[in-house]
Amino acid sequence: MELNELEKDRIIEMAWEDRTTFDAIKAQFGLKEQEVIELMRLNQSPQAFKRWRRRVSGRKTKHEKLRSEEVDRFKCTRQRQISHNKVSKRS
């Protein structure tokens, strides 16, 4: 699947959001969890990728089947809006 820069930026943003599941990314963009991991690896600096992997490894909110039934939204209501995030992307 060929993704444009805006789609890649949005997937990266969704992957960093704690409450956005890999299932939500798959539903919107058709990418499986392993494909999201590869996209993150290729489009972020090595250090940012390692930080992200530590952050999401074992996190129940990233997997719909492991989430509490009380969680029914993709992102925290207190999370600020991020647009065109290029801070941790590779040049």
Image (tube, rainbow, N blue to C red):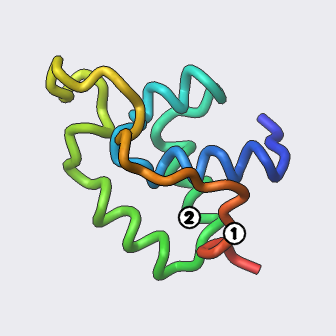
- On the image, the x and y values in percent for residue 51 come to 37, 72
Q: In which quarter of the image is residue 71?
A: top left
Answer yes or no: do the residues labelled 1 and 2 have beta carbons within 8 Å? no
- On the image, the x and y values in percent for residue 23 come to 44, 26
In the image, 57: left or right of 18?
Answer: left
Q: Quadrant of residue 55?
A: bottom left
Above or below for 6 versus 43? above
Query: Secondary structure beneath disc 1?
Result: loop
The numbered disc on residue 41 is 2
In the image, 38: left or right of 53?
Answer: right
In the image, 12: left or right of 24?
Answer: right
Q: In which quarter of the image is the C terminus?
A: bottom right
> Residue sitting at 48 percent across and 43 percent down?
34
- On the image, the x and y values in percent for residue 40 come to 56, 59
Q: Which of marks 1 and 2 is nearer the N terminus?
A: 2
The numbered disc on residue 4 is none
Q: Specify the amino acid type for callout 1.
A: Lys
Q: In which quarter of the image is residue 57?
A: bottom left
Q: Which residue is denoted by mark 1 in the rendering?
A: 86
Query: Secondary structure beneath disc 2?
Result: helix
> Residue sitting at 62 percent across and 24 percent down?
28
In the image, 51: left or right of 83?
Answer: left
Above or below for 90 versus 65? below
- On the image, the x and y values in percent for residue 31 come to 59, 33
- Nearest the eye: 74 or 24: 74
Q: Specify the amino acid type for callout 2.
A: Arg
Q: Which circle, 1 or 2, is nearer the viewer?
A: 1
> Residue sitting at 61 percent across and 54 percent down?
39
